[in-house]
Image: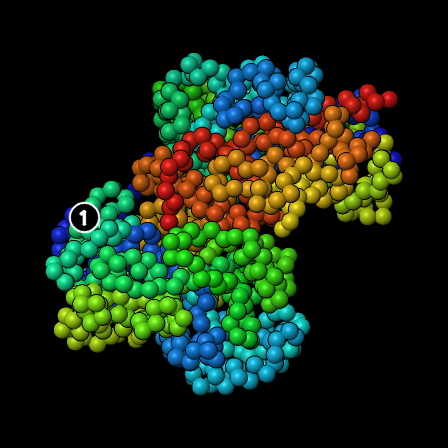
Amino acid sequence: MKMDTVIIGGGLSGLACGISLAKRGKRVTIVASGQSTMLFNGGSMEMLGYVDGKAVENPLGAIASLPESHPYRKIGADRIASIAERVKLLFSDSGIEMTGSANANHWRITPMGVAKPAWLTLSDHLRIDNLNQLPAKRLALMCIRGYFDQPNAMLAKGLRDLGFEVDMIEFTTDDITALRRSPSEMRATSLAKHLVSNNALQRVADQFNNLAGDADMVLMPSVFGQSDSSDFQLLQSKVNKPLRLVATLPPSVAGMRMMTQLRHYFKMLGGTYLTGDTAVSGTFDGDRLTSVTTAKLADMPLKADDFVLATGSFVSRGLKADFERVYEPVLGVDVDADADPEKWTRFGVLEPQAYFGYGVATDSQLRCLKQGKPIQNLRAIGSVLSGHDAVKMGDGTGVSLLTAIAAADHIREKK
Amino acid sequence: MVLLPLKQSFMVTSDIYKKEYDVIIVGGGATGAGTARDCALRGLSVLLVERNDYSTGATGRNHGLMHSGARYAVTDGESASECISENMILRRIARHCVEETDGLFITLPEDDLEYQKTFVEACQRAGIRADVIEPAEARRIEPAVNPELIGAVRVPDASIDPFRLTVANLLDARLHGAVTLNYHEVEGVVMNQNRIEGLKLFNKQNGEHVEVRGRVVVNAAGIWGQRIAQMAGANISMFPARGALLIFGHRVNNMVINRCRKPANADILVPDDTVCVIGTTSDRIPIETVDDMRVTREEVDVLLKEGVKIAPSLATTRIIRAYAGVRPLVASDDDPSGRSISRGIVCLDHAKRDGIEGFITITGGKMMTYRLMGEIATNAVCAKLGNTAPCVTAAQPLPGSEEGAPDQRDATKRYSFGQRAAIGRHGSLAARIEKDNDIDNALVCECEGVTVGEIKYAVHQLHVHNLVNLRRRTRVGMGTCQGKLCSCRAASLMGEFRHDVKGAQEDLAAFLDERWKGMRPVAWGDTLREAQLTSAIYEGLCGLDLAVNMEGKEDVQ
């Protein structure tokens, strides 16, 4: 089986790269374990949220202030600007409605009611463009009875601190009450499975219309709409005030929905998506990778002209650490990491942790290095890359998307 | 509407400070709690004060092993006899805190099989049942054991939950009139000439300084007892022995496994509820460092290397946490150099020893012998007060383990997962957990089966002020996921119970920080992965780091 490109990793970055290549007629196979950190997504993409602990207003403008080791610096600010426009297109082509600008961050609202800078946010989620001009005065915060993955009191306090008037209103419907009989069923994904029919949504809407009082916007946790945004539109059509969603603790229904939509689009473009399989090793010939072997297709190595490593960070097992070292487990390519394990972490759980910046070492064209030499046809993208910090810099999804498309461009341009 | 009703929360009123008590006990570990219970059962009026949460010292920082005494049989026959006698008592009075697992003492090819004979003879002398079994039989009854073993002895070791045990003693003391205060630190003593008449306390929760009065003060503060004694002008030479331990992410063994050799580093593996614990190292440390319980890389290295010899599957099992405790060893009075250190129980009457009236120190010993230590200390108190009531703590079951208490293993009963877990934790007291409200049965912590009702019960009746307290009372966040989502759910609920959202966020951050302290020394492999996941959720997704300011915050205990 010979492909143009094999992508190891089917998360946000792998899919964005796959779509970008498949759109140009490349034959692409993605090997996907089936798990993705989009399960923890809050309904937004972040290009660059913080530099030196300060919120960034203009992400594109702030790239110049980043260290040279940051993936954005490798791509270059000008190129990032044009790729950023293509990311928006990629989402709309996939049926994902997102708004935002790479020149001006807006604010997303976290499950704890904290405003964090964001680049793109789903149009059905609450967002604030200007903290001095809130999109509503009084909010009806609809809290689902018995659902604990939305810390309602924290959310309400955060919203009040931002200047909203907030009415916390508990509600339930027969469908939700039935779900609650099994004590472990009250998770966002099970709610989403049950809040699908016209009748179920009508019962929710009836509650909102009865209880929302004189609020001028209704907020509810993002717990429905598994496959696309039509459920939201249906509910909004039944509710007589503007309706917005707020992110919940994991699992993130919105994140899973986006992944479903991207996957559909990739397959529609002719891409092959191998779910539930993982790459375990690769065969090199000099400075080229010739094939990759997966766990399920052990006797059928995947051959391709180009390969992309999009396996994610430690959390996705794209990077591993043992008692003594940090390494990349599939292909054994070079990593940027401190040799001394004492430096990987520090006490203080909310302090910056060095290991967040660890990852695969690449050259200026995102090519992986092996024993210091670039592998000509192997590129790394997304969270597996070194030099960024999804938590403290707020650049995780941005690095995933922007490096994905930059790598796809390099692959197309090299011939 | 969203708020759940706040019921009979435990409040400190100023009346508590005004009263004169028969006895004031310093220290809320197992020994202090056991002493408080004994004193209260003998009809004394009791005040117990603890500077942090209950069971934060050595009580909460050991294996959770209910020794049969076999470990001490060869080296310290007296301790061994004490252990087996207390072991049999605890099986009766603290049934809901004990899991009767039995234990193995295994001989590996690198050990001397001759020692087994010495060991068995010593056990017999101390009255400990010790059955030599074939290695094949040992492998059959405990599949996790190192298959290369060349000898095995079966003994009545067991697993015990020290947090639950301490709380059960405190509950019983309170049922008999005792007042118990956590987060009250002793700042000084009130002396009248050569007699202690009370203590100066600092209430860490509201910043108040208060004085309390008592006829006798019992110093049961463990390693911190040296400082308490100093305040009264008595000098006790303590030799802190630090021991580090590792908790693994699931329970690989069903029996306690020991090495059959002279006690050494990391030679005991204990199953505790859903996890298992290997330990300990043993290092003498300077007394000034007893509050720094962070585990080093070297300690982890030793524990892992030795642990794998006991149960090879530990090599591939995730380590979820490292922790350390300090044994309060005391130099004997005729040799303050520390060369002859007692591992046994030490009860000092400072009137005889130092000319200070009304002051007793109870120290040394083991978590295992806490009840006996309580009895000895109470005898000394009663002698001073002229009280002649007999000790009944060996016969009377603790709350939760009364005659006819429900048993979580009773297959004839239909319990939900949460109810079964709660009965295991609280015994008959589980009946006090509310089930009427339609969300009381909802699970907050899925690993450990903790429900909303159980959290309410703990907050209102078990002195829970923060998530770390809650973890000790209910095991919330103690399971495999180490509080990844349940800590947020619990924080949010507590914020509602206590009407303090900002406080709940700070509490959540402090809870995560406390978890990280235990995870950081073992932060590689899946533990590092879990840590990154936790950061991704609480910082990346939620922005908890922006909602709270941790600077200048004291450690939560």
Total labels: the figure holds: 1
Residue at position x 43%, y 59% from top?
B285
**Residue A414 vertical position relative to residue B417 in the rendered view, above or below:** above
Image quarter of the C terminus of chain A = top right
State the residue in front, B540 or A110.
Answer: B540
SS for dot 1: strand
**Residue B91 vertical position relative to residue B533 in the rendered view, above or below:** below
State the residue in front, A342 or A383.
Answer: A342
List the residue tagged with mark 1: B210
Disc 1: host chain: B
Task: Specify the quadrant of the image occupied by residue A390.
Answer: top right
Residue at position x 44%, y 70% from top?
B66
Residue at position x 59%, y 39% from top?
A355
Amino acid found under the numbered disc labelled 1 = Val
Task: Specify the quadrant of the image occupied by residue A412.
Answer: top right
Residue A161 point in image, percent of width and height? 37, 24
Can residue B178 be spotted in the picture?
A: no
State the residue in front, B89 or B361.
Answer: B361
Image quarter of the N terminus of chain A = top right
Left/right placement of residue B174 relative to residue B105 reads: left
**Residue A219 vertical position relative to residue B52 in the rendered view, above or below:** above
**Residue B445 vertical position relative to residue A270 in the rendered view, above or below:** below
Residue A151 point in image, percent of width and height? 43, 36
Residue B203 point in image, percent of width and height? 24, 46
Residue at position x 48%, y 40% from top?
A349
Can residue B484 be spotted in the picture?
A: yes
